[in-house]
Structures are given as structure tokens and as C-alpha cells.
Image (cartoon, grey):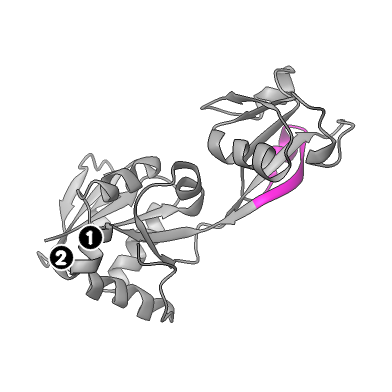
């Protein structure tokens, strides 16, 4: 039986709708008061796992799920050993550097060496500042509202996901740079995909057909 890891949060509704469009129904996860973390599709062809978005690639990498849906931002941060197959074209956001509106800095390159940058995306921030800009900074790991870093004076800047930009604006912050754009991606366990375990390839092809795509991003 095919197992699919589905992300809690903002991507869940559209993920479920996508699978419904190819004949797999995991909508029970959306039922009011649902506490189940594993459900079977009514057709008996697949089961779904409801997990934190950051854990989707873990379940796929270790073979507990053949397929999963996760944001590109998570893939960039965690760099898991999974096959990234389809850009699902929903869940758009961007990874950005932001500073207070009254900051003297108007580009990331203007930040002084050893400035403090708050982020929950530590590897992405490190790759950007050390790899692309060759600018040494102190990266402060936060797991909550990183906007508080500059507000409290703990950091000069943040690296965080931005969707509409409303949260930044309401907290007196402004974007300086966009590191990359992110959308939801369909990922697969590489061996399951290559060997077509539980008809993994068939389901991937169904997703691509639904989206009008013919090529995979990569096959792992």
C-alpha cells in the first residue's frame, strides 16, 4: 500500500485536494476535531500520514512514506536524500533578508562583518552570507517569531519566509534581498521511485498529468 506523508499547516488543504484529483482521498484529516495521524484512503490503495512539515522529508528519506509534499524551503534547509519530482505550484513564499525600516542598511552586503542575523533557517542563512556574499555574520537560531530579533535589538537582520509581507510590515521590518522562492514539491523515496514500489511511479505520473507537466525536477 502506498504511504503518503502530508504536511500539517498551510499546505495541507491544497495537498489533499491534489490527491483527491487523482483518486486518493485523505480529507478525513480536515474533519473538525480530527486527532488521527494516520488514515487509509477509502479505496484501500493508500494511507496518509499527517506530520509536521519539517518532518515530511524525514519520513520519506527513511522509507516510511513513498511520497510526500513539502515546501522547497524545507528541502533547502534540511537537504534530505529524497527525489524531488514535481513543482506543485502552490504554497508560494520567498526566503528573504529583512531589517528594521529605520535601519541604515539597504542591502545585505552593507551589513557590517559579524552582524547578528536571527533565523530558524540556519543553513540557508549560512549558505547565503558565507557562501554567496562571503560575509561573516553571527547567526542566532530562533524557533518562534524571528521578527522579535531586530525589534528587541538582539539582531540587526533576520532571514525568514515571507508570503504577503504583512507580518514584516506590521512589525516595522522591510525586505532587503530575496534568497530564493519556494513552492510545494512532491518528493519520493529514491529507491521506491526507481523500483516502482506500490506503483509509486504511476501516482507520480498522475500528479504530473493533473498539473500538465511531463518532466520531473530530478529523479534522485
User: Foreground: 146 or 214?
Assistant: 214
Q: Give the percent coordinates (x, y) of residue 212.
A: 43, 81
Q: Is residue 72 above or below residue 17?
A: above
User: Foreground: 189 or 90?
Assistant: 189
Check whether the beta carbons of the residues at disc 1 and disc 2 lie within 8 A of each other. Answer: yes
Q: Give the percent coordinates (x, y) of residue 75.
A: 45, 49
Q: Which mark is residue 191?
A: 1
For mark 2, give the secondary structure: helix
Q: Residue at x 24, y 67 (%)?
A: 194
Q: Residue at x 50, y 66 (%)?
A: 89
Q: Give the percent coordinates (x, y) of residue 7.
A: 36, 48
Q: Give the percent coordinates (x, y) of residue 76.
A: 50, 48
Q: Is residue 220 above or below residue 114?
A: below
Q: Is residue 175 above or below residue 142?
A: below
For mark 1, give the secondary structure: helix
- From the image, state whether disc 1 or disc 2 is nearer to you: 1
Disc 2 target residue: 197
Horizontal arrangement in the rendering, residue 131 relative to residue 177 (left or right): left
Q: Residue at x 18, y 68 (%)?
A: 195
In magenta, the rendered stretch is 164-179
The C terminus lies in quadrant: bottom left
Residue 168 magenta-highlighted: yes
Horizontal arrangement in the rendering, residue 99 relative to residue 190 (left or right): right
Q: Earlier in the sequence, mark 1 or mark 2?
A: 1
Q: For label 2, count other residues whose C-alpha is less than 10 Å away and answer few (under 14), some (14-19) or many (20+).
A: some
Amino acid at each position: 500500500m502506498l504511504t503518503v506523508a502530508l504536511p500539517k499547516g498551510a499546505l495541507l488543504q491544497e495537498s489533499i485536494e491534489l490527491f483527491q484529483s487523482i483518486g486518493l482521498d485523505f480529507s478525513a484529516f480536515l474533519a473538525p476535531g480530527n486527532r488521527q495521524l494516520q488514515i487509509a484512503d477509502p479505496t484501500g490503495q493508500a494511507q496518509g500520514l499527517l506530520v509536521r512539515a519539517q518532518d515530511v522529508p524525514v519520513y520519506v528519506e527513511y522509507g516510511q512514506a513513498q511520497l510526500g509534499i513539502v515546501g522547497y524551503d524545507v528541502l533547502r534547509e534540511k537537504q534530505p536524500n529524497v527525489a524531488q519530482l514535481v513543482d506543485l505550484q502552490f504554497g508560494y513564499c520567498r526566503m528573504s533578508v529583512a531589517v528594521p525600516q529605520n535601519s541604515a542598511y539597504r542591502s545585505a552586503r552593507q551589513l557590517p562583518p559579524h552582524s547578528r542575523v536571527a533565523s530558524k533557517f540556519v543553513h540557508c542563512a549560512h549558505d547565503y552570507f558565507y557562501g554567496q556574499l562571503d560575509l561573516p555574520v553571527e547567526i542566532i537560531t530562533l524557533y518562534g517569531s524571528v521578527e522579535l530579533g531586530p525589534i528587541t535589538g538582539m539582531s540587526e537582520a533576520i532571514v525568514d519566509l515571507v508570503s504577503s509581507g504583512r507580518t514584516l510590515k506590521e512589525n516595522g521590518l522591510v525586505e532587503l534581498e530575496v534568497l530564493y522562492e519556494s513552492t510545494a514539491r512532491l518528493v519520493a523515496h529514491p529507491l521506491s521511485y526507481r523500483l516502482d514500489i506500490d506503483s509509486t511511479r504511476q501516482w507520480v505520473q498522475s500528479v504530473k498529468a493533473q498539473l500538465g507537466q511531463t518532466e520531473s525536477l530530478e529523479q534522485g
